[in-house]
Image: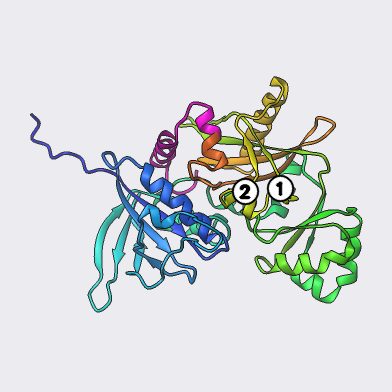
Amino acid sequence: MSDQQPQSKPVIAVVFGGRSSEHVISCATAGSVLQAIDRDVYDVVPVGIATDGRWVLPDADPEKLRIVSATELPSVAGDATPVALTPGDGSARLTSSPAGEPPQVLGNVDVVFPLLHGPWGEDGTLQGMLEMAGVRYVGAGVLASAVSMDKAYMKVVLNQAGLPTMPSVVVTAREWRIDEEGARAKVAELGYPVFVKPARAGSSMGISKVHDAAELEAAILEAQQHDPKVLVEGFAGGAREIECGVLGTLDGGAQTSVPAEIRIGGDHEFYDFAAKYLPEESTQLDVPADLPADVVARVQELSVGVFEAVGCEGLARVDFFLMPDGSLVVNEINTMPGFTPTSMYPRMWAASGVAYPELVERLISLALARDTGLR
């Protein structure tokens, strides 16, 4: 028997919650990931970010992190014990500050698993902090996160790479305030109906389908509740909604899942928050999608193209419109897609032969293997 002490397990900090309107979704995602990480292989520290931005040691009971109904939603309590990450060399030190006591070092963190959706988490801000702290983390880097979060700039990057997107215009808060008539005119050029959405939000928060000019103001104001920068996008009439998962590989490449299809039912005109997350909704998720082999191949090829165009790492879900004429148009890329076992991204990988715990393990392994700093 060797006299050497056994090597300690890597420490994974699962960070969730956050300041964005997708706080609830992040909590639900964290509950699933916390259950899936193999505690025989990793030590796990849950870290919550309250809606006011405070970092705390949260109650991470997975049952308390489930979305039960529209009125029973999980959240991170801001009055829990504060924690902080301090820079290290390939790892970061996690310190807690209990009330009335000196700070306590909880240990070094080898990988941060950021399960934050939306601004101040999925948009490059947290990634920048982790880069400065010199700690590895799961998922896309600063630029890829920022570009993918901002749907307007995402379109600029994808179009430059020759990837098709829906026509759209941006309406800033200043423009709507000082030149509403001009903003209305450029929206009208898209032709109604249009979709009005926050430029930097997700989970269908703040999105409205606008049938005519009379509905535009209310939709703009609703989107501005989530982001002062608003994207107005043309309507993909008659299109099918197709999604595909992308997963990085240890050699720097990327592989794709089988595609899936979202079919909206009931009273929903589009894939809104209720259709996505609330129980007993009539949305149908076809995994895998019923598509001809050549369309599947094209979806997968374009998904890797989108992933590489924005410089993504780790994981992404790429969403498409399959138009009536058979063409594919990129809707968006999500660098931290919904990640509960019933979410589309893990379901696509499960249908591709990668079970949920293995998917979580692969993402952690990718993060542990990559360098800190510029890559």
Location of residue 351 with respect to 139 vertically, above or below: above
Which residue is located at x 47 percent, y 50 percent? 29
**Residue 250 locus on image (x, y percent):** 45, 32
Q: Amino acid at mark 1?
A: Gly
User: What is the number of the mark on residue 281?
Assistant: 2
Quarter of the figure with residue 189: bottom right
150 relative position to 221: left or right: left
Report crowding for label 2: few under 14, some 14 to 19, many 20 or more residues within 10 A (C-alpha).
some
Q: Which residue is mark 1?
A: 266
Earlier in the chain: of badge 1 and badge 2, it is 1
Q: Are marks 1 and 2 in contact (CB under 8 Å)?
A: yes
Q: Quadrant of residue 55?
A: bottom left
Report the residue at 72% width, 21% height from top: 294
Which numbered circle lies on residue 352?
none
In the image, which residues are magenta?
348-375
| Percent of width and height locating residue 2 | 9, 31
- Mark pair 1, 2: CA separation: 8 Å
CA neighbours of label 1 inside 10 A, class few (<14), some (14 to 19), many (20+): few
Q: Secondary structure at mark 1?
A: loop
* 314 relative to 148 in the view: left or right: left
Q: Amino acid at mark 2?
A: Glu
Q: Is residue 373 left or right of residue 199?
A: left
Which element type, helix, strand or loop, lies under badge 2?
loop
Please report the residue visible at 81 percent of the width from the left and 30 percent of the height from the top: 326
Q: Could you say which quadrant of the image residue 122 lies in? A: bottom right
Is residue 371 located in the magenta-colored stretch of the structure? yes
